[in-house]
Image (cartoon, helix red, strand yellow):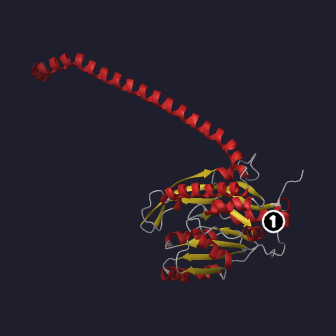
Amino acid sequence: MIFPNSLKNLETNVPKDGCVAIIMRTKNRIILLSRAFDSVLTQTYTNWHLYVVNDGGHRGDLEKFISANVNRFQGKLTVIHNEKSLGMEGASNSGLKQSKGEFLIVHDDDDTWQPEFLQKTVGFLNDPKNSSYAAVTTNICRVHEEIVGETIVELDRYVYPLFRVDTDYLLDFSRILSKNEGWPISWLMRRSVVNVVGEFNHELLVQGDWDYNIRMLMIGDIGTIPEPLANYHLRLTELDKDYSNSAVAGEKLHEKYRVLYWNSLVRSAINTNPDMLGMVRAITYPIIDSQEGFQAKINTQLETLNKRLDRLEAAVIDTHLLLNKFLGPVRWVYLLTRPLRKLIAKFSKQT
């Protein structure tokens, strides 16, 4: 069986230099940027070039930090300044336009890699048996942290297993369509595919990585490495807007753009082919009806549970009142005989 895969139609003039173009977006987050630099510099795979995009942040502070670290990169660092913030996707495009290399990845300034991340992901895409894959992604660790002064304090971490060793050899397109589970930090792409997919959608204030992943899956399949080789860092309580996570601080914005994005896709499909309207309803109505029925069942069960808890609470109160009723006289006798008990105790000590 031959599966549709437009990788066969990609341009073949992309240099096979093995170089990874790393795009790192940042804005006034020097504390995090220092850790991100270490994440890149400690890679066991050394054929890479880092493109740092300062998206409207304080230029002087960044240049001072870069000057203190530039020698560590040995010429493999390019800094791009956006005078005004273009947003996350616009910043990615600034790096995309200037970058060169056979592979490309977006490394946000607050995330990190395990030292062997590039070694294993580049090795995967270079393996001849994986030549049909447009990109590769790995499992991740979710890291919860907070910033105290100028120190990053890790609170906890756990493996977030998107793929299982025994079954998940590539991404399921339908899974990505239903939920954004492709983090930029874990997603290494072929330049030849990026050239076809094009720029990131700068109209999206958030959810741009989801849109890009879907567009890439339209080109070809995405391979998986089940090891947690990338770390996605979250600051759940960070009050400083510069150091907060967009997924946390902008949770409502993410939900808004998730709906706007899908409305636009459905609208485009129906405008292109009005007959799709009936198909969309035929597919979605049973799902929505099932969800509503399931929610109604859950609500009924919760209501029953609440009634039982109310009855249990009333029984506890009644038991408490009953104990007070029976123990009241006992307490009264105990208090009334206190002088006598003291006299007996005193007499016992003397004898």
- Which residue is located at x 15 percent, y 19 percent? 332
Location of residue 86 in the rendering, given as x and y in whole percent from the top left corner: 56, 73
Q: Is residue 3 above or below residue 287?
A: below
Residue depicted at 71% across the width and 66% down the height? 118
Question: Residue tagged by mark 1?
Answer: 126
Pick the front one: 284 or 1? 284
Tell me where residue 116 appears, x and y as whole percent: 69, 63
**Along the horizontal axis of the image, is 9 left or right of 328?**
right
| Closest to the observer, 251 or 279 | 279
Q: Position of residue 198 (x, y in %)?
A: 71, 70
Does residue 297 appear in the picture of this structure? yes
* Residue toward you, 21 or 69: 21
Most extreme residue toward the right is 1
Say if residue 116 shows up in the picture: no
**Badge 1 element:** helix
- What's the residue at 54%, 54% (across, down)? 255
Q: Please give left or right for residue 336 compared with residue 186 in the image.
A: left
Q: Give amino acid for label 1.
A: Asn
Instruction: Work out whether 131 lies above or below 27.
Output: above
Q: Is residue 311 above or below residue 113?
A: above
Q: Quadrant of residue 45?
A: bottom right
Indicate the position of residue 311 as horizontal and vertical percent values: 38, 23
Q: Residue at x 73, y 54 (%)?
A: 273
